[in-house]
Image: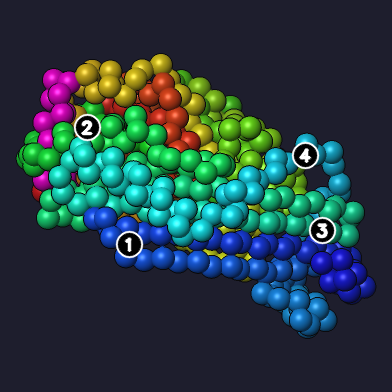
Amino acid sequence: MKKLLDIAAKVSDQAEVFSIRSDDSSLEMRNGKPTDVSASIQSGYALRILRNGRIGTAYTKNLLDREELVSNAMDSLKGKVEAGFSFPEPSDLPASWLPDESVSGMGFHDLHSRSRKALDYLKRKVEGQIDVYSGREVQDTAIMNTSGLDVSRKSAFMYVYTSLPFPNTETGVHKFYQSRKPGDFPESELDKLVDLYTAGLPEVDIPTGRMKVVFTPDTMYTILWRLSVATTGKSFYNKVSPLQGKRGERILSEKFTLYGDPTDTEEIDQRFFDDEGVPTKKHTIFEEGVFKNLILNLDYADKLSEEPTGTGYRGGMWGGETVSLAPGPSLNCSRVAPGNVSFEDMIKGIDRGVLVFGVLGAHSGNILNGDFSVGLNPGFYVENGVIKGRVKDGMVAGNVYDVLKNIVSIENRLHDSTSGGKYPSILLDDVSVAAK
């Protein structure tokens, strides 16, 4: 990296080198039988150069020809992409936690053992298909720039994902467990999964109308996706956000607080700098319903004459090779602050409503404007505080700025979600529900 940076420094005003190496393994077991194993090792280097107020970029999977990589970055300057920012200087950062070496060393035998324990436990509780997925991810990241920054981090974690598909369907209920250390899926959580599965076995029709709706942790991204897009520096710079000019105003229910905190000691992927080397911190977007801050990377912070917020990341919802993606404004390690009601009590308080455990079509509707219209996959119908069964066919629709003004309650604990954040379930009132 240092050699590459030195070469780039000779032909640019500033330069930055980003490197990443990931080592992932996964095991899929469907109905007790291994159906897929996967292992991948990827590495890459991304170069950004600043020259005469413009930015050039290039990336490679190896460093066999550093001069060619620099030449490619120089060629990209012809695109005349303006960049008024500078790469960050060094700052005092806490020491990152060191990953547990036993996670890094987990092989397919270890993954099979973790999956088998969850599978055997569930087989004693339910009949029908049981799917279990397990894996481990190890990652090394480093950033160097000509401003003197030289930082690196390591991370490692393992996970187990359990799913109980309903008979003769491709939909079901699931639970997700992850840990920095090798561990087994908590039996108490598996018991809750069994209870949900049993409650959802009957298939019921539902009425069309406005009623209470619960978004569970794994479906919260439907709502948060829309809020995140509207609060990025990109949307504000392009003057397309519906929240333009509304910072400091109460937009949502005072029960709702949304923030990201990569520095939290309980975070599975704790980090003290973003993918541009800017120090991270707890960053609040909505506090008790009040719109507080934007999500900014170096580029859009400069464009809007604001300070970067440590939220510049390479990546996206649709995946892709990390080194090939430019750092964009993104809320990492996001959380919705918990409330004071248990999930069980939340259900008891519903006179008529739907529990959303999975959605189809989260990408539909005007995302920037906050609109959504999603199919239930699955959804449960609740009447007088009792789950009646699984919704045969149904949809929920609305606008996040409307429904988040009508929050009845928020669950009192956070759950790891498959979309990457930690969220509670949220009970909303007066949401449009349609039966097909």
Nearer the observer, 223 or 35: 35
Q: Amino acid at mark 1?
A: Pro
Q: Amino acid at mark 3?
A: Met
Q: Quadrant of residue 36?
A: bottom left
Q: Is residue 302 visible?
A: no
Q: Position of residue 91 (x, y in %)?
A: 85, 42
Q: Which numbered disc, 1 or 4, marks the residue closer to the eye?
A: 1
- Is residue 142 on the magenta stretch? no
Q: Secondary structure at mark 4?
A: loop
Residue drawn at x 50%, y 22% is 288
Boundaries of the magenta span: 381-395
Q: Which residue does the numbered mark 4 point to in the structure image? A: 95
65 left or right, relative to 28: right
Q: Which numbered disc, 3 or 1, marks the residue closer to the eye?
A: 1
Q: Which mark is residue 34?
A: 1
Residue drawn at x 65%, y 46% is 99
Q: Which residue does the numbered mark 2 point to in the structure image? A: 195
Q: Which residue does the numbered mark 3 point to in the structure image? A: 144
Residue drawn at x 41%, y 21% is 412
Distance (Cα) linking label 2 and label 1:
26 Å
Q: Which numbered disc, 2 or 1, marks the residue closer to the eye?
A: 1
Count of picture labels = 4
Task: Name the magenta segment's main secondary structure.
Answer: strand
Decide: few, some or many residues near mark 4? Use Cα within 10 Å; few <14, some 14-19, many ≥20.
Answer: few
- Relative to 174, does residue 387 appear above or below in the rendering? above
Q: Amino acid at mark 2?
A: Asp
